[in-house]
Amino acid sequence: SLNDQISLIPPIPKSERKVDGPRKRRKVLTIRPTKESRPEQVLPTGKKGRSSLVSVPLKKKEAHPGHVPQPPSATKGKVSHATKPTTKQEAPEVKVSPHINSVTPSNLREEKMKFFKSQFTYNPQFQYSTPDPPSVPPEYRTASGEFLDLAIAIIEKTLKRYGSYERFQDNAGGRPLQEHEIATAVQRHLQKEGCSGEMKVCITKDTLCIASMAIVNGRGMLTINASTARERWLEGTLCHEIGTHYYRSMNNMKQPWWQERKKYGMRPVNPTEEGFATLNTVLLRDQPYLCRAALLYYAAYKASSLSFSELFKDLSAYVKDPDTLWYICMKVKSGLTDTSQPGCNSKCQVYLQGVLQLLRYRQTIDFQLLMALGKISFEDVGRLKRIAVSKGARMPYFLRDKREYMRRLEHIMKVNGITDDALKKLIDS
């Protein structure tokens, strides 16, 4: 699951380098804990009837806000006692935010240790716990340089404003949040949107994603990474995951093309889906820099011709923190095994690509209709709106005022130095 901040994966403390036995996996609450399971903090919604479960594991010791998420263990696929299904058959999990589907290596911690010990010269050899080695989908094996110059300009504009990427995170994003603060903010957002009783929320450190959204048995499941949540950026993360991915998914289920996209000749949902979500991530910020999207675009382009260690060195011109650099390299090398070879997962480019397409045609796009019609490319809206079901569509609070939404899009362009002339040359040519 993206929002506009970079996950920080700090160096592994010495006390954690030797582990006896398998690591404990995170628990995603789908039912209330039994007497035998570990107690959880469950925050009520304040409404009678169904309530959303905001689960925060009780802590024995206060963790550093940059705690290293644990990679999947060798027991991946087994159902823990706390999440054991109560019926023989359950509906499959439907991913709502497609950017979080990247495979996490099973030897992530070990390879990170080798990389850091080598002074960033070792090229990780990743292993995966999946039955068959993962591979990057054909459409994401080649990176584009179409918007490279603009991506670099956005990065440099951000760094000029804040001095460094690290200061950008600290000053623009604010302080890291504790788990109870995240839980409170999430509950407040759910109540504002009027969807408290339909979603489960898991707050964990055992994930490499900033956040993710899925539909499990017809109900929303939001996972928030407690290691990356920041005071002034969390609301944008929720607008990304709930206000875009979740609402578009729920609206999509009402459409005639739900599960029949080929029949209607529909275009791929990306880059519109992630571009829309990225715009909504930064929409409410005073300084809505698109630096993260631009950085991922640039990194994917470079990864196509560089090894892991070479990419790490190249990106250090913009980012100084080794853990942030590690995360970016991991993101754009996702699904690869031998990172000594050039290669990329260019899915990371859809954030900026989608943003620029939507901004280019913003004057002719009905963004409320784009939300109401569900998982649809902006290019298909005009052709399919006659048969679409828009009555009763879910609409996030930040999109209910069309004029204000358009004003904020103009502000995003101004802050990032994006002009209509530049967009026309890049996209129309």
Image (cartoon, rainbow, N blue to C red):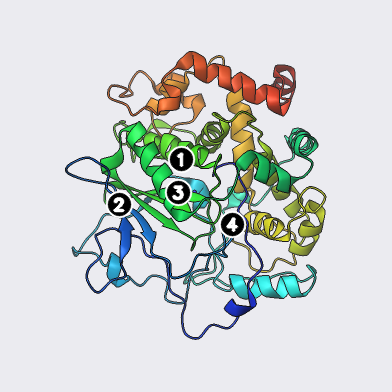
Q: Secondary structure at mark 1?
A: helix
On residue 182, the disc is: 3
Question: Which residue, given by chain and number where applicable, does mark 2 sit on?
Answer: 53
Q: CA distance from mark 4 to mark 2?
A: 35 Å
- Point out residue 192 in the picture as x, y percentages from the top left corner: 36, 32
Chain-order first, disc 2 or disc 3: 2
Give residue 410's quadrant in the image: top right
Q: Secondary structure at mark 3?
A: helix
Chain-order first, disc 4 or disc 2: 2
Residue at the spot x=77%, y=45% of the render?
164
Give residue 104's quadrant in the image: bottom right
Q: Residues within 10 Å of mark 2 (few under 14, many from 20)?
A: many
Labelled pair 4, 2 in contact (Cβ < 8 Å): no
Chain-order first, disc 1 or disc 2: 2
Question: Which residue, given by chain and number where applicable, does mark 4 sit on?
Answer: 136
Q: CA distance from mark 4 to mark 1?
A: 28 Å
Chain-order first, disc 4 or disc 1: 4
Q: As drawn, which residue projects farthest toward the front?
A: 61
Q: Residues within 10 Å of mark 1 (few under 14, many from 20)?
A: many
Q: Is residue 117 visible?
A: yes
Given residues 179 and 352, the one toward you in this image is 179
Amino acid of disc 1: Leu
Q: Residues within 10 Å of mark 3 (few under 14, many from 20)?
A: many
Q: Residues within 10 Å of mark 4 (few under 14, many from 20)?
A: some
Q: CA distance from mark 3 to mark 1?
A: 11 Å
Amino acid of disc 3: Ile
Given residues 356 and 258, the one toward you in this image is 356
Q: Secondary structure at mark 2?
A: loop
Amino acid of disc 2: Leu
Quadrant location of the C terminus? top right
Q: As drawn, which residue projects farthest toward the bottom?
A: 20
Whether residue 350 sits left or right of residue 24 in the image: it is right
